[in-house]
Every structure is written in C-alpha cells, then in structure tokens.
Amino acid sequence: MAKAIQQKKTPNPLAPERVAAVLDTLQKTYPNAVCALTHRNAFELTIATILSAQTTDVTVNKVTPELFRMYPTPKKLGEAPLPEIERIIRSTGFYRAKAKNIQSAAKVLVERFGGKVPQTIEEMIQLPGVARKTANVVLGSWYGIASGVVVDTHVLRLSRRLELTRETDPVKVERDLEKVIPQNHWIQFSHEMIHHGRQVCIARKPRCVDCSLETLCNSVDKTWSSR
Ligand code: SF4
C-alpha cells in the first residue's frame, strides 16, 4: 500500500559508495541497454541522432530505412535534393532545419573527413547539427570511445532527481556527471539512464513503485515511497 511521502535528504548524494550503488542498480536493471536508434554504421548513427532532436527514436526509426536506402553514403546524401530529404524526414519535426543539417553534415564528412565519421569530439562537433550530445552518442555507441556522458532530456531529468547534479544546462550537467561517474561507466550509464527515463522515471509521473532505484532516491518528484 502506498505510504505518504516524507521528504528525506540524501546525506551525501555524490558519495562514491552511493554513486556506485546507483551504477550497480542501473546495470543490473538494464544489463543489455543499447542505443535504440537503428543503424548499421557510424554515418547512419550520426544522421539518425541528428534527426532524433525533439522527437522519439521510434519516429526516427520509421524514416531512416527509406533515407538510407536512397542515400546510403555521405556522398549520396550530400548530393541529394533538399526537398526530397525534407519529404522523407518530415514526420521527425523541424524537418527543414534537419534536412539542411544532415545534407550539410554529409557534405562536411566528404569534404573534410574523407567520407568517414571522425573519432574525436572536436572533429565531430564541426558537423552541422552535431553538438556534444550527438558526438558522445556516436563515439560511445559506435566506436566505444568514452568521450563523455550523453545528456539528453532523460539523463538530465534523472540526474537531477537522483541529485547527481543541480544544473539544468546539459553541458554543465555533463561536466558534473563526469566528475562523479568513473569514465569506464560513461557509455553504459547513458544507455541505462535513457532506458530508465523512458520506461520508469518518466517526466510527468515517475513510476516510483516499479523503480529499482527507489530506495536510493529522495527526489521531490517521487510519487511513492517505500520508507
Ligand atoms: S524513485 Fe521515482 S523519481 Fe526516483 S528515480 Fe525512481 S522513478 Fe525516478
């Protein structure tokens, strides 16, 4: 039976043993968490991640099969007619800006990087439409390079609820997380947090009664407490 929620304080939310318990619980809850964007290579993942801004991975996964069937390489996408790209990706929202970005990113890949997605964050963010989040997704998920923690809307919300940061700006949140999360956990931590944010710790009404982190969490947003 649900109890009235008493607001508690986490004595030291950043204590290494508390952070380790969060990481351990996430890992046990989502042992096979991977990026949900369908892709076959770094190029496809880069484009899919650009398209995923302000929409769901499910929506992106519906448009990318046609997009990559018609334009399977950076060269082909860079040369594709803009109205045709817009038509294909329309349902992902902001399609005019996104079409321009993915076409330009494809051109930059060809002109500056020999058609290959680069493996450093500094080079990645030279691609139009690519900021740290997209760069970290591609470097982590495809290349296995722990360049940073991916901070999307789920990671941001959960990190605040779990008191791993007080910041609201994604770049500052990333900086805070990278101070407390050991680097060898960065890639999986992002995947696990995104899964948890989608399935349990949802934005409007978190499903705390089903949450494996519940005993570690003292968020003001909790909807249920075991203690
Ligand atoms: S207990 Fe609730 S608010 Fe805390 S992490 Fe779990 S679902 Fe989110």
Image: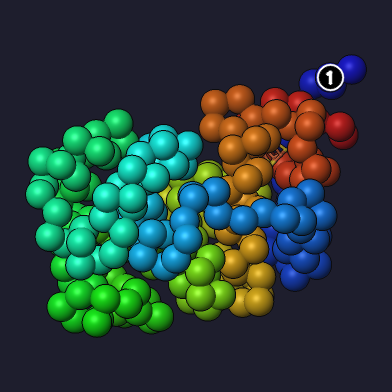
Q: Is residue 95 left or right of residue 49?
A: left
Callout 1 amino acid: Ala
Residue 18 shows up from this direction: no
Ligand 1 - quadrant of the structure image: top right
Say if 87 sits above or below 37 in the image.
above
Q: Residue at x 62, y 51 (%)?
A: 193
Foreground: 157 or 38? 38
Using the image, determine if residue 36 lies above or below residue 16: above
Q: Dot 1: what SS?
A: loop
Residue 123 screen position, x and y as percent:
29, 79
Q: Which residue is drawn at the image coordinates 29% and 64% (left, top)?
A: 73
Total label count?
1
Q: Position of residue 39 (x, y in %)?
A: 47, 56
| Towards the viewer: 146 or 138 | 138
Q: Can you say which quadrant of the picture contains the C terminus?
A: top right
Q: Residue furthest front?
A: 69
> Residue at left 26%, top 76%?
115
Pick the quarter of the image with the N terminus: top right
Residue 141 in the image, given as x and y percentages of width and height: 53, 66
Residue at the disc numbered 1:
2
- Name the residue nearer the viewer: 79 or 43: 79
- Residue 72 or residue 97, whichever sits in front: 72
- Where's residue 58, x and y in %? 48, 37
**191 to the left or right of 126:** right
Q: Is residue 53 left or right of residue 4?
A: left
Q: Residues within 10 Å of mark 1 (few under 14, many from 20)?
A: few
At 20% from the left edge and 75% from the top edge, which residue is drawn? 110
77 in relation to 200, above or below: below
Q: Splitting the image into 4 quarters, where does residue 11 fall?
A: bottom right
Q: Quadrant of residue 186?
A: bottom right
